[in-house]
Amino acid sequence: SSSSYIWAEYKYSEPYKYLKNQALFLIIGIVLMNILSKIDYKKYLKCKLLLSEIILAPFVLVASIILAVLSNISVEGLITIFVMPQLYLLSLNYISLVINSRFYKLTWSNEMEVVKNSKSVVFVMLIDFAYTIIMCILLIVGGVLFNLWVGAIVSIVFEIIMTLVARNTLYKK
């Protein structure tokens, strides 16, 4: 006989307690699986974006506030400090979702392998690095050749375009 049978009889005076619990959770799991499989995956994507923004945006905002308080900057500098990082975060969240939806790993032996060993992790890191370099170049070149305001506007427009392209790619049928 099974040790769970003996333990359940000893502890709960009900030898089939664990079997009943497993049967109950099996039924709940099947019901939930059927319900959740009918939900459009795009709703999950929106939830992922929202969760990522809720978690990361306050940190970006606090860093922006600290930088604004510690430095004596102009209005365009304040716009650059507050708007650009939030747009950058939103844009990269969309880009990351696009990449993760294209390069997924379905064969794995543990949960960490799905996240840490998939191609999408490397692609997201490389694209994040390239995106950061492009943003710095746009901001610096625009700021040096013209003024900081022009560099900020060009960078913000680039972020908005990248966000819209990634969003449209993600939600394309």
Image (tube, grey):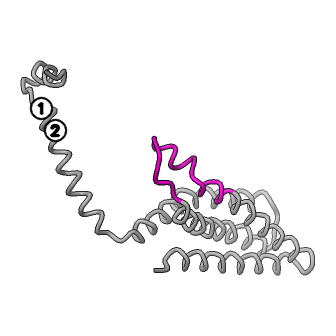
Q: Which residue is mark 2?
A: 21
Q: Is residue 46 left or right of residue 153?
A: left
Residue in the picture at 48% in, 60% down: 51
The x, y position of residue 129, in whole percent, is: 74, 59
Q: Is residue 159 left or right of residue 167?
A: right
Q: Residue furthest left?
A: 13
Q: Residue furthest front?
A: 107
Task: From the viewer's side, name the closer residue of 160 and 80.
Answer: 160
Q: Residue furthest right?
A: 145
The x, y position of residue 16, in whole percent, is: 9, 31
Mark 2 neighbour density, 10 Å: few (under 14) some (14–19) many (20 or more): few
- 137 up-or-down from 62: above or below: below
Measure how far apart labels 2 and 1 are at the Cα level: 6 Å
Residue in the picture at 65% in, 76% down: 162
The x, y position of residue 101, in whole percent, is: 51, 65
Is 56 magenta? The answer is no
Task: From the viewer's side, name the closer residue of 159 and 171.
Answer: 171
Whether residues under marks 2 and 1 lie with C-beta atoms below 8 angstroms apart, the answer is yes
Q: Amino acid at mark 1?
A: Lys
Q: Which residue is mark 1?
A: 17
Callout 1: SS:
helix
The x, y position of residue 5, in whole percent, is: 13, 24
Q: Which residues are magenta?
A: 104-125
Residue in the picture at 16% in, 32% down: 18
Placement of the N terminus among the 4 image quadrants: top left
Callout 2: SS:
helix
